[in-house]
């Protein structure tokens, strides 16, 4: 399993998070990593607090990790 951590900040675009996640997932599938058993990607979000962060469109995303 690969761990991918993205930093969240207020008023960011949801696509700034979703698009890279989709690209990385597609690349992992194209590389055949899923068939080899090591292709699972674990996406996590980090911010200054664990309070939900509002994107520009109003979508709340709750970080699971703190930035240090």
Image: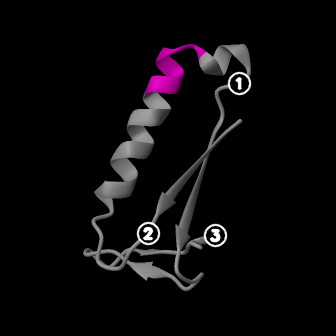
In this rendering, which labeled residue sits more in front, label 2 or label 1?
2
Question: How busy is the neighbourhood of tag 2: few (under 14 within 10 Å), some, or many (20 plus)?
Answer: many
Find out whether the residues at labels 2 and 3 contact each other: C-beta distance under 8 Å: no
Q: Nearer the viewer, residue 65 or 26?
A: 65
Q: Which residue is mark 1?
A: 38
Task: Return the disc, 3 or 1, that comes first in the chain's sequence.
Answer: 1
Q: Is residue 34 above or below residue 18?
A: above
Viewer-side residue, 36 vs 10:
10
Q: CA distance from mark 2 to mark 3?
A: 10 Å
Q: Measuring from the top left, give residue 26's x and y in whole percent.
A: 44, 28
Q: On residue 8, which mark appears?
A: 2
> Where is mark 3, residue-wise?
64
Residue at disc 3, secondary structure: loop
Mark 1 secondary-structure assignment: loop
Quadrant where the image shows the N terminus: top right
Where is residue 63 shown, x and y percent of the image? 56, 72
Q: CA distance from mark 3 to mark 1?
A: 23 Å
């Amino acid at each position: 399993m690969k761990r991918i951590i993205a930093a969240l900040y207020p008023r960011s675009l949801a696509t700034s998070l979703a698009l890279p996640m989709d690209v990385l997932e597609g690349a992992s599938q194209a590389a055949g990593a899923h068939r080899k058993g090591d292709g699972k990607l674990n996406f996590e979000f980090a911010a200054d607090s664990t309070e939900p962060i509002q994107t520009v469109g109003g979508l709340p995303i709750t970080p699971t990790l703190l930035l240090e």
